[in-house]
Image: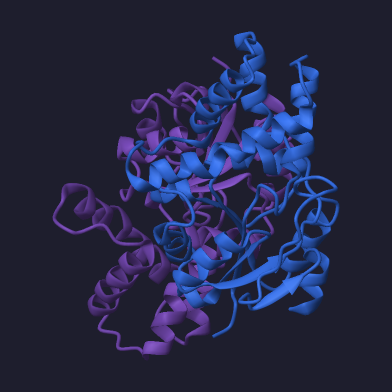
Chain colours: A blue, B purple
């Protein structure tokens, strides 16, 4: 079955959340190492998604989850910051720069097939991120549209359904093996894109031997397809 | 309250369904006047939406409703056509040309605010229409995301919610007073765009004195904002 649509994970895969969030800690004058604070905030992401997926926390948009995990992070570091600074930090996740290959890579991939996001970010956040990075998608799809979060199967299946395609006609592109495994579990194809700087220069190496394709960036992916 | 997003009706407002559908009747070799057949098909649109909104027909994607109304149209005209021709006719609604001002108008309007569709077309159909016309939107929103049809309030409210905006921060742009009234009823702003050729050269004149803005095309709308 032919791949008719590519759906993209966003944080880490398309945009460099670490640099953008660290810059926001820096701009807000928050004491401490901005990169370490960004990493600490992001480390609270998977656990809080797990609470939602496990049913112990009601579904909420990512802004609200970021707000809650920021609370935890600040408490752990004994930091007390102004509400305006807090809001700016949560808003920083709406304006993260794309990796350099992303804009031309999406343009190349869009020629022959549909390209869409498939992110845990809610639609409004995706609008902001796409506008900030001048990224052109055919559609912004989000786990919000299924009121769940990846890697729950319904997030992937809802995306395929909205695109009017069979799951096997849709390929998830992501830098994260867990997300790719979730896509495969739901019947989608999967392409691993390496983002060796997602966690900064010392990022642990990643690979996904089960992915249908692996590429160093979106331009290499476009060439491989 | 500032207008932060414009959401666009699609059939008639952005794309010329009549010429495209008439061309498909012509290409399919269906006997009869192609424009009259297109008009007759479209005339069955509001009634079948009424059945869904009234609860006598379950919600279904527009492709399915087009399929059902095509059945009625063909039966009325005593026409019996091949399944492949039928499929082509239903698919014609996925590749309709935009009015000439639409591509540059959307580009101009996108500079200062979010632009999105808000159509009764399902998301997959909107992907096809936007790609066919090379139209750039920030998001494709559809009544499908609320599993209803305009002018039900939930169609408009879901769009505002997904954009993270108050209804009054969103303006519907449409050529159809009924749609604009539905938007206002849900708390949105409204802009009337005249499409004097929607039903061909003899289209009845339209206006909406209750709209916040009226314009002859999207470029005039961009200038007025």
Tell me which residue sits at (35%, 28%) in the image. B186
Location of residue A7 with respect to B145 vertically, above or below: below
- Give the residue furthest to the bottom: B82
Asked whether, in this view, residue B47 is left or right of residue B19, the answer is left
Location of residue A201 with respect to B154 vertically, above or below: below
- Residue B16, given in percent of the width and then of the height, sits at 55, 58
The quadrant the N terminus of chain A occupies is bottom right
Q: Out of A44 and A175, give the one closest to the viewer.
A: A44
- Residue B92, given in percent of the width and then of the height, sits at 50, 72
- Residue B172, given in percent of the width and then of the height, sits at 49, 34
The quadrant the C terminus of chain A occupies is bottom right
- Give the residue furthest to the left: B56
Q: In this figure, what is the number of numbered marks?
A: 0
Residue B119 visible (yes or no): no
Location of residue B27 with respect to B164 vertically, above or below: below
Q: Out of B147 and B42, give the one closest to the viewer.
A: B147
Asked whether, in this view, residue B120 is left or right of residue A88, the answer is left
Residue A20 visible (yes or no): yes
- Residue A156, given in percent of the width and then of the height, sits at 47, 61
Asked whether, in this view, residue A123 is left or right of residue B142, the answer is right
Q: Out of A109 and B11, give the one closest to the viewer.
A: A109
Tell me which residue sits at (39%, 48%) in the image. A53
Tell me which residue sits at (61%, 63%) in the image. A177
């Amino acid at each position: 079955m032919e791949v008719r649509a590519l759906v993209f994970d966003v944080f880490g895969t398309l945009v460099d959340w670490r640099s953008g969030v660290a810059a926001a800690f820096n701009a807000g004058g928050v004491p401490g190492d901005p990169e370490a604070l960004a990493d600490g905030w992001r480390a609270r992401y998977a656990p809080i998604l797990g609470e939602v997926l496990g049913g112990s926390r009601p579904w909420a948009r990512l802004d609200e989850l970021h707000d809650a995990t920021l609370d935890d992070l600040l408490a752990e570091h004994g930091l007390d910051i102004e509400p305006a600074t807090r809001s700016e930090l949560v808003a920083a996740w709406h304006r993260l720069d794309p990796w350099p290959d992303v804009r031309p890579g999406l343009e190349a991939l869009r020629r022959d097939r549909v390209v869409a996001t498939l992110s845990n970010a809610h639609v409004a956040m995706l609008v902001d991120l796409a506008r900030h990075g001048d990224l052109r998608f055919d559609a912004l799809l989000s786990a919000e549209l299924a009121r769940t979060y990846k890697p729950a199967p319904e997030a992937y299946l809802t995306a395929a359904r909205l695109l009017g395609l069979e799951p096997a006609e849709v390929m998830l592109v992501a830098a994260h093996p867990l997300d790719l495994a979730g896509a495969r579990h739901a019947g989608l194809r999967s392409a691993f894109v390496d983002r060796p700087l997602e966690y900064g220069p010392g990022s642990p190496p990643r690979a996904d031997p089960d992915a249908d394709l692996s590429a160093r960036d979106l331009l290499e992916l476009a060439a491989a397809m």
